[in-house]
């Protein structure tokens, strides 16, 4: 599986999120820290489910939190 495009997208995301002049989020919106936290929690959950599948269990994924 070629993950080059995904890696490039994450690299760009981290570059932008690290910029010191990011504006505050609009009313009701998420700031860069909240977006990164959400992405990382979803990535961790996805990895846990994938590991469970490889281990032979029947994991579930629920990102409603």
Image: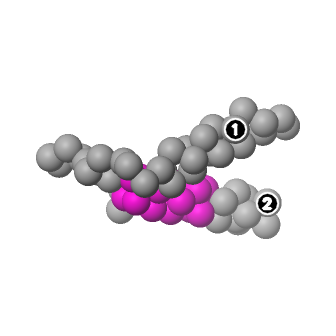
Q: Is mark 1 on a helix, strand or loop?
A: helix
Magenta segment: does it hold 41?
A: yes
Q: Which quadrant would the C terminus be assigned to in this image?
A: bottom left
Looking at this view, name the residue that lies furthest to the front. Answer: 21
- In the rendered image, residue 59, in percent from the top left (x then y), is placed at 61, 62
**Magenta stretch prevailing secondary structure:** helix
Residue 51 higher or lower than 28, as above or below: below
Neighbour tally class for label 2: few under 14, some 14-19, many 20 plus, Cα within 10 Å: few
- In the rendered image, residue 49, in percent from the top left (x then y), is placed at 64, 60
Q: In this view, does 41 lie to the left or right of 25?
A: right
Q: Which quadrant would the N terminus be assigned to in this image?
A: top right
- In the rendered image, residue 52, in percent from the top left (x then y), is placed at 70, 65
- Checking the image for residue 8, the label placed there is 1
- In the rendered image, residue 2, in percent from the top left (x then y), is placed at 83, 35
- Does any portion of residue 9 appear in the rendered image? yes
Quarter location, residue 44: bottom right
Q: In this view, does 50 lie to the left or right of 59?
A: right
Q: Is mark 2 on a helix, strand or loop?
A: helix
Q: What's the CA distance linking mark 1 and mark 2? A: 26 Å
Residue stretch in magenta: 32-46
Quarter location, residue 37: bottom left
Foreground label between 1 and 2? 1
* Residue depicted at 79% across the width and 60% down the height: 54
* Residue depicted at 53% across the width and 59% down the height: 40
- Does any portion of residue 61 appear in the rendered image? no
* Residue depicted at 65% across the width and 45% down the height: 11
Determine contact: label 1, label 2, CB under 8 Å: no
Q: On the image, numbered disc 2 is attached to which residue?
A: 54
């Amino acid at each position: 599986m070629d993950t080059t495009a995904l890696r490039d997208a994450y690299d760009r995301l981290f570059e932008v999120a690290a910029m010191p002049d990011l504006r505050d989020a609009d009313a009701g919106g998420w700031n860069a820290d909240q977006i990164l936290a959400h992405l990382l929690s979803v990535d961790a959950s996805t990895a846990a489910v994938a590991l469970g599948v490889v281990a032979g269990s029947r994991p579930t994924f629920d990102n409603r939190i």
